[in-house]
Image: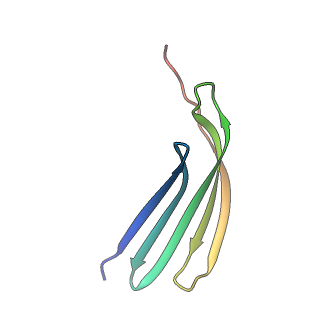
C-alpha cells in the first residue's frame, strides 16, 4: 500500500507556532503535532531558545508526548 500524508504549518507574528503531520500508511492513520514556545530572542529579534512540545497519535488514538528545549547561536558578520 502506498503511503500518503499531508503537513500543515501555522505561524504567529512571523514565527512558526505549530506543525501538524498526518500520514496514512498500511491502512493506519497517524498524526504528530509539534507546538513551539519561544523563550529567548537576540538583539535582532531572531529566536535563540524555544521549547518544542511533541504529541504523537497512533491509529487507535493513543498519544505519546515529550518536550525539549532547542537553542541556536547565530553569528552575524558586519
Residue in the image at 47% along x and 66% along y: 21
Residue most extreme to the left: 2
Residue in the image at 52% along x and 21% along y: 76
Q: Residue 16 or 34: which is nearer the viewer?
A: 16
Q: Check the image and report above or below for 17 versus 6.
A: above
Q: How many marks?
A: 0
Q: Check the image and report above or below for 43 versus 39.
A: above
Q: Is residue 15 left or right of residue 5?
A: right
Give the image quarter of residue 5: bottom left
Horizontal and vertical percent for residue 68?
A: 66, 53
Horizontal and vertical percent for residue 43?
A: 63, 24
Q: Is residue 1 left or right of residue 78?
A: left
Residue most extreme to the front: 13
Q: Check the image and report above or below for 70 versus 18.
A: above
Q: Quadrant of the N terminus?
A: bottom left
Q: How are the residues colored? A: rainbow
Q: Residue 32 or 37: which is nearer the viewer?
A: 37
Give the image quarter of residue 4: bottom left
Residue in the image at 66% along x and 67% along y: 65
Residue in the image at 67% along x and 58% along y: 67
Horizontal and vertical percent for residue 75?
A: 53, 24
Q: Check the image and report above or below for 45 versus 19.
A: above
Horizontal and vertical percent for residue 57?
A: 57, 75
Amino acid at each position: 500500500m502506498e503511503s500518503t500524508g499531508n503537513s500543515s504549518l501555522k505561524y504567529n507574528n512571523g514565527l512558526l507556532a505549530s506543525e501538524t503531520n498526518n500520514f496514512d500508511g498500511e491502512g493506519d492513520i497517524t498524526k504528530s503535532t509539534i507546538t513551539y514556545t519561544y523563550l529567548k530572542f537576540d538583539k535582532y529579534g531572531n529566536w535563540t531558545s524555544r521549547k518544542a512540545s511533541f504529541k504523537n497519535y497512533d491509529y487507535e488514538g493513543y498519544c505519546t508526548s515529550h518536550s525539549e528545549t532547542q537553542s541556536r547561536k547565530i553569528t552575524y558578520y558586519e
